[in-house]
Amino acid sequence: MKRLIESSLLRLFILSVLVLSINSCSNPGDSNDRISELISQMTLEEKVSLLGGMDGMRTNAIPRLGIRTLNMLNGPNGVGGDPGTAFPTGVAMAATWNEDLMHRIGVAIGNESRAKKADILLGPTVNIQRMPLGGRNFESYSEDPFLSGRLGVNFVKGVQELGVATSLKHFILNNQELSRGSYSAEVDERALREIYLPAFEMVVKEAKPMTIMSAYNKFRGVHCTENEYILNDILREEWGFEGFIMSDWDAVHSTVEASHAGLDLEMPGKPKFFNEKLVTAVKEGKVSEEEIDEKVARILNIYEKIGVFSDEESLPKGKLNTVEHQELAAQTAREAIVLLKNENAILPLDKGNIKKIAVLGPNASVNRKGGGGSSEVKPFYSVSPIEGLKSKLGNEVELLFDEGTKPAIEDYIAIPSKYLISEDGEPGLKADFFNNEYVSGKAVVTRIDENIDFHWGQKSPDKKIQVDRFSARWTGKLIAPLTGKIRIGVKSNDGGYLYINNRLLVNNWGMHGPHQKSTELDVVKGEKYDIKVEYYEGGNNAEVKLGWQLTEPKTTISKQAVEYAKNADVVLLFVGLNKEFEGEGFDRSSMDMPGDQDELIRAVSAVNKNTIVIINGGNPVSMTKWIDGVDGIIQAWYLGQETGNALSDVLFGDYNPSGKLPVTFPKKYEDNPAFPYYQKVQNKAIMEEGIYVGYRYYDSKGVEPMFPFGYGLSYTSYEYSDLKIENLGDEEVKVSLSVKNTGKYDGSEIVQLYVHDMEASVDRPLKELKGFSKVQLNSGETKEVSIKLDKRAFAFYDIEAKEWVAEPGDFEIFIASSSKDIRLKGIFSLK
Ligand code: BGC
């Protein structure tokens, strides 16, 4: 009896300490009491119900205790679900290098979250961009941890000021999408600490995100959702994270291990592991009820922090698509644009001197506003490049529009029914549907489908089949339409497999948006081949297609486009990627632009040297085939709803470009440091490049990039002078300098500060970004800029001592306009 009393006393004590430590509301005492009181009234089953989702985007409620569901919406560049303001995506935001702007975007997104009744916004994404094929690089900020961290801090603070929780994601090392649910990130401790963790660390410590999302992948062989070292040891113990940890969608793989490791909430519902299995684990003594209570307390504390337990009516209501939000989206888009090349000062264009513009390319009349997957935002309106040009130029200038080449989406036609035959000889294929994601067990529906070309959206194929988490298998024979080579493939959202004669030929398995993969097949006309397609739907939209392409793709360059180019004063050529090529669940297959876009640029620039290429993409594309033939290049990322207006403002000089690259653009894929390791070992992300990621590698190893980190041109020029380095004591250093706008245009310059340890006991990169400042300067104006550095700016992670160490000695301080364009140098001696 005594032991029992002792243990419940201890339990109460642990719980109140926990509640006390994570609550920041004005009356912590009241809230602690309320939460402890609520927990004490819950059955074990009720407690566990709070640790798993109810459905796709909501948690469970306990109405009898007045606990409602928590609603979540994505994401990092605007609020998902119903229409809302679509901001530029993460990498574009990062190209602004504007902390204040990020804060304002956070506030606007927080405001729209309130209008959509979202309690938790699933973002921002601060994973490091390790290599230029990463499928979700468009969504995250940078290759540099410091820049990523600063932007994340400001975004999170902004959103949370509106009483909306954020979910910082994806913790950790989700730097590729290939096999994202199963690969193991193998990275050394120093790279983990110096490259992949600091952005998360900075945001957790400074902005206190209320939740964090653990990633799909494994880290050193253990899934992130059950990885004690990263969740409990680093995130909670070392950094003092006080919020709750949720899983990425369907990223949980165990009950007891995940619970012990520190995971609090399994998403989405219905949970697979934090359900009756967790109740049983408690009853069997494998998980203590204290552990469950701690998780419940962490979750209820968020209710408290965002005001759900107080007077909800008094909280800000929020508004969608306000004029302020529209203008903020436009400002972000303008500031994100990076001018990469401006030979013969071809830009800005002077509309007084131009009569005809050829507006060409597959991205001219469509606004490629974002990448694919959960971060997609449906805006109330969207301005394509040509619409932006029309509203800027009215009838003053003639616009000659042609797509130039077919949209670079190689979308196959569905294989017609007459080429498919079921085992019973009926036209079409036999279909078995399962109420699980594993194409296993007893089929709940069996039928013949004429062919496979389904767009179920958020519905299910049959009322006997559940809406999400179902799977299907189609079997039968394929009759070859010709003798020779065909391309055959599966387009699926989510996973698909294609087997021919029992051999797996196309592996498109995984949680992703609509994505097509194909293979080449040698066939003989009239021959029959065994065919099997397997498919699963994990959540959200469902679609699947079995398609083929029977003819060799021909060059698709339009003669009309070349003709227009010949007759125009200037060519604006809109090319690049789109959400079919960059999205969740897959990486790009190469750095090349899809389709015939390279050829289009060559054909057009051959007849008109005044060609300006404008590129969409969250990643760099290879430019070597055409770069010397064009005068102007603009990196336009994915700029959200205001793309067309922002681009016209820059093209015609109403806005002087100020964006700088948050990521190195290599000349070719093989130049990037992850190249030797990526995809070399199945299901492993071997990261032997260690700390040499991005410019740290290109710089230190002497590999010349196409455009370096931090690079971006302006219509004006800036002069740097008067570097001063002052030791303020208390481990603080102040670096100040003057910047003068020496050109004709007003503009903004992003001043970058890099540090180099001159005599280190360990290998250190040639320079590392440790500060930056964006300064607005009218033509002729001079301003003083000052940047503060703390001790961490000089430190490396000592793997023996397990701590950050700043070794006494001399450090070079570089003040730069890009990582390759150092304007001032000084030395600071650390005592
Ligand atoms: C993504 C997350 C997203 C979640 C909910 C997952 O597939 O990885 O970033 O927040 O879905 O939509």
Image: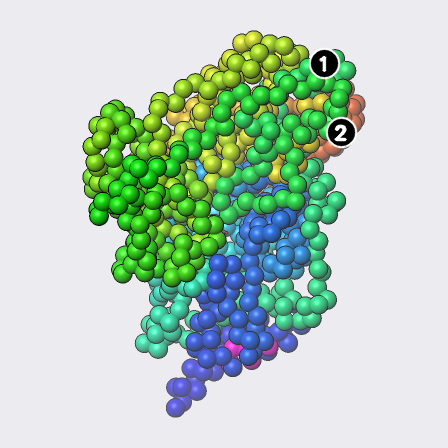
- Quarter-wise, where is residue 130 in the image? top left
Query: What residue span does the magenta drawing correspond to?
Result: 34-40
Task: Say which amino acid is labelled 1.
Answer: Lys
Determine crowd level at label 2: few under 14, some 14-19, many 20+ residues with C-alpha closer than 10 A. some
Which sits in the foreground, 339 or 249? 249
Q: How many marks?
A: 2
In the depicted structure, whether residue 49 falls above or below residue 43: above
In the picture, the disc for residue 355 is 1
Mark 2: secondary structure: strand
Give the mark, 2 or 1, whose residue is nearer the N terminus: 1
Residue 284: image x %, image y %? 32, 76
What residue sits right under mark 2 in the picture?
777
Residue 760: within the magenta? no
C-alpha span from label 2 to label 1: 33 Å
Q: Residue at x 59, y 67 (%)?
A: 303
Residue 118: image x %, image y %? 60, 58
